[in-house]
Image (cartoon, coloured by chain):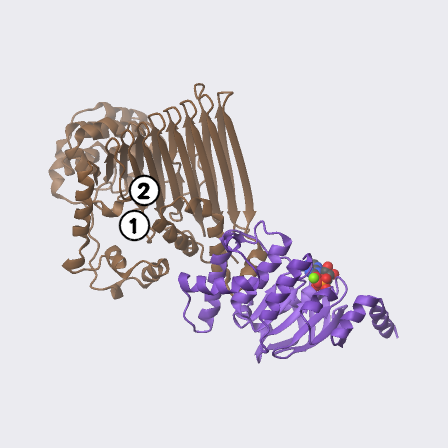
Chain colours: A brown, B purple
Amino acid sequence: MSDDLKILDEVTNSEYKWGFVSNIESDNAPKGLSEDIVRFISAKKNEPEWLLAYRLKAYRHWLTLTEPTWPNVTYPSIDFQDIIYYSAPKTKPTLNSLDELDPEIKSTFDKLGISLEEQKRLANVAVDAVIDSVSVKTTFRESLGELGIIFSSFSEAVHEHPDLIKKYLGSVVPYTDNFYAALNAAVFSDGSFCYIPKGVRCPMELSTYFRINSAGTGQFERTLIVAEQGAYVSYLEGCTAPMRDENQLHAAVVEIVSHEEATVKYSTVQNWYPGDKQGKGGIFNFVTKRGICLGNRSKISWTQVETGSAITWKYPSVILKGDNSVGEFYSVAVTNNMQQADTGTKMIHIGKNTSSTIISKGISGGRSQNSYRGLVKIAKGAVKARNFSQCDSLLLGDQCGAHTFPYLEVNNKSSKVEHEATTSKVGEDQIFYCNQRGISTEDAVGLIVNGYCKEVFNKLPMEFAVEAQKLLAISLEGSVG
Amino acid sequence: MLSIKDLVASVEEKQILKGLNFEVKPGEVHAIMGPNGSGKSTLASVLAGRKEYEVNSGTVTFNGEHLLEMSPEDRARAGIFLAFQYPVEIPGVSNANFLKTAVNEVRKSKGLETLDSKQFLKVMQEKMKLVEMDKAMTQRSVNEGFSGGEKKRNEIFQMAMLEPTLAILDETDSGLDIDALRIVANGVNALRDGKRSFIVITHYQRLLDYIVPDHVHVLYKGRIVKSGTKELALELEEKGYDWIKEEVDSSVNA
Ligand SMILES: Nc1ncnc2c1ncn2[C@@H]1O[C@H](COP(=O)(O)OP(=O)(O)O)[C@@H](O)[C@H]1O
Ligand SMILES: [Mg+2]
C-alpha cells in the first residue's frame, strides 16, 4: 500500500481503537502521533465529545499537509513520530534554597534584576506559607470575577464555559490554516482563556503568571482572548527569565477576537533557550498568532520582543474586518550566535477606513539570520484603508544577515500604503564615543540597541519594558568583535 | 600627570605623529595650535585609545600608569576625557540616561556607590547651570538633531558630569558663535580647580582670550615645533603659520 493510501485508509477507518485508552493511567503517551494519541490526550483531559471530534478533524487534515519550506530558515527535518505529544505536567524539582540553582541561571536572574522572591518562585524554591503566591493569585481572581472577567486555563474553560469555547475556538485560526496550526489543534496540551464582558475595562495587566492551575507552559499551547463590545484588556505573555525546555518543538496558537469598540493589547517577551554558541540545541518556535477586529472601531495591538529560540517562525496578524478598526504590530527581534528568525505580520484590511501600523526592528549579531516578512493586503471594499510600515534592521557584525520580505496587495485605489525600510550597522564611532565616557563595549552595544528599539519598548507595559531592556543587553553579550 | 615621550603613531599605514614630546602637570592648561592636518586630532585620538590609530613607538604615562596599555574605557575611568571635534549621535538614548550609565561606570571603577536616579538628577541639575543647559536637552537623544553649538555645549556638560583629571578639548570652539563660545569657556573655567589639567586644541586665539592657557604649543608635521606662553598665540594670530613652517622646513632641509 502506498503512503497516500495508507493515510487515506487511516482517515476513513473511523473505527475507534479503544485498546489504547486503557493506558490512561500512564503519565506519558508513547512517542509518535496517531489518532489513538489524539484520543488519549482528549481522554486524559476528560474532554467532551465535540472537542475530541474537533481534534480528530484537525489531525486528519494535518495528515494531508506538508511542512512549510518558504521561511528563510534552515534546520534538520523534524521527525514528528519522534515526539511525545502528551506528558503530565512535570513538577520541577524543588530546591531548598537559591544556592542550589544553576549558577548561570542565577547570574542571569541577577542581571535582569529579578527580586529574590521572584527568583525563588521561578526556580521552584520551597517557600513558607506566608508568602505563598497562591493566596495572592486567588485575590486577583476574585476581583476579576466580580467584573465578570474570565481568566483561566484552557482546559478549565472547556468545562466551565463550553459555549464560549465552542463559539470561538478555531474562529480566527482554523485548523486548516497551516501545518502547525493543524498540529496544534490536534494535540494542544493547555493554554489560557480570557474573556472580558461588554463594557468592562480590565483593571490590571493580565499575565499568565497570575493564571490559576496553569499546567506549565506547554509545547502546544493554545490561547484564546475574547473582548466583548467596548471592553479593554492588556495581556502579557511570557517571561524575561531564561526558559529552558526539553521539548525542542513548540507550536502555539493564539486567537484574539475584538468586538465593536473593544481593544486588546497583547505583549510578548519570548526568551526560550536559543541553543549554544555553535547552534546546538535550542527551541524551534513555530507560532500562529492572529486576531480579528470583528466590530467597528475595534483595535488589536501586538507588541513582541523576541530574543530566544533557535528558530522563530511567527507572524502575529490582524484581520481588520470592522469599519474604522485599527491593527498594530510593534516588534523587536534579536538574533545572536546561530539563531534564525523569520518573523513579521499580516494586516488584512477588509473594512472601510481601517488602519494599520507596523514597526519592526530586527537586530542581528554573531552569525545569525534575521528576516522580516510582512503582508499588507487591502481588499476591494476597504475604502480609504491606510497602512504605515517601517522595517529597520541593525547589524552588529559582518557575519550576520538581515533580510526584508514585504508583500503588498492593494485592491483599492482610495487606500494609502507607506513603507520605509533601513539597514544600519552599529558604528565603531558610536561604540568608541561610549568607551570614551567609561562605558564598556558590551554595555555600549546594549545602550545603542536599546535606543534603537525605543519606539517598540515604549509600547510595552512599564515593568515589562525595563526587564525587556535588560534582557536585550544579555542576549547580545558577545555579539560584537 | 601626563608625559609623552617620542611618540610615533600612524593611521592607515601613514605616519602622522613623528616623535612627539609633551608634558602636562596638574592644574595646567596647555593650548595646542597648528595648521590643518598637522596631527592634533590624531594626538587626541591616540591618547583616548581609538583603535584605528596605531602607536609605532614611544611611551605615554598618565599618573604613573602606562596609558597605551589601557583600554579606552579604562582610560576614561582613570580620568581622561575627550571633548570630540565631531560628537557622535546615539538615537533613542537620552542624554540623561547615557550620562547616568557613564557616571556610574566611572564611580564603580573607583569603588564608589552608584547613584540612583534621584541622586543623579540632583548632580545633573547643578552641572546643567554651568553650561546653561536646559532640561529638554537632557531628555533628547544624545546629540541627535543638536546644532553644532549644542553638540559642543553637550560635550562640556558631559565633562562637568564626569569630572576628569585631564580634559582634552578638540576644537571645541569651532563653529561656535560668540555667545556659545562664552558659555563653553565659562564652563571650562568653572572646572579649573588647580588640579584638573586641560589640553585645548584650537585654531583660533579668540578662545584663549576666555580660557587663558599656561602654555601654548605649535604642532606641525607630527611634532611640537614651538612652545611658549599665551603671547605665542597672539603672534600666530597676527603672522599665521608660514614663518614657523619655513623655520621647520629649512632646518629639515639643512
Ligand atoms: N581615520 C583616518 N584615516 C585616514 N587618514 C587620517 C585619519 N585621521 C587622520 N588622518 C590623516 O592624518 C593627518 C592628520 O589629521 P588630524 O590629526 O585630523 O589633523 P588636525 O586635527 O591637526 O587637523 C591628516 O593628513 C589626515 O588626513
Ligand atoms: Mg582636528
Q: Please, is residue B110 above or below residue A81 in the view?
A: below
Q: In the picture provided, is A102 more to the left or to the right than B154?
A: left
| N-terminal label among 1 and 2 | 1
Question: Which quadrant would the C terminus of chain B be assigned to in this image?
Answer: bottom right
Question: Dot 2 corresponds to which residue?
Answer: A250
Q: Which image quarter: residue A120?
A: bottom left
Is the C-beta separation of discs 1 and 2 under 8 Å? yes
Question: Dot 1 corresponds to which residue?
Answer: A245
Residue A402 % position (x, y)? 51, 43
Residue B154 % position (x, y)? 57, 59
Note whether residue B52 is visible.
no
Q: What element carries label 2?
A: strand
Chain for numbered disc 1: A
Task: Establish whether ligand 1 lies closer than 8 Å to the Cβ of label 1.
Answer: no
Residue farthest along the top direction in this orientation: A381
Chain for numbered disc 2: A
Tell me the quadrant of ligand 2.
Answer: bottom right
User: Toward the viewer: B86 or A407?
Assistant: B86
Residue depicted at 68% across the width and 65% down the height: B42
Q: Please, is residue B166 above or below residue B144 in the view?
A: below
Residue A234 % position (x, y)? 31, 40
User: Toward the viewer: A243 or A360?
Assistant: A360
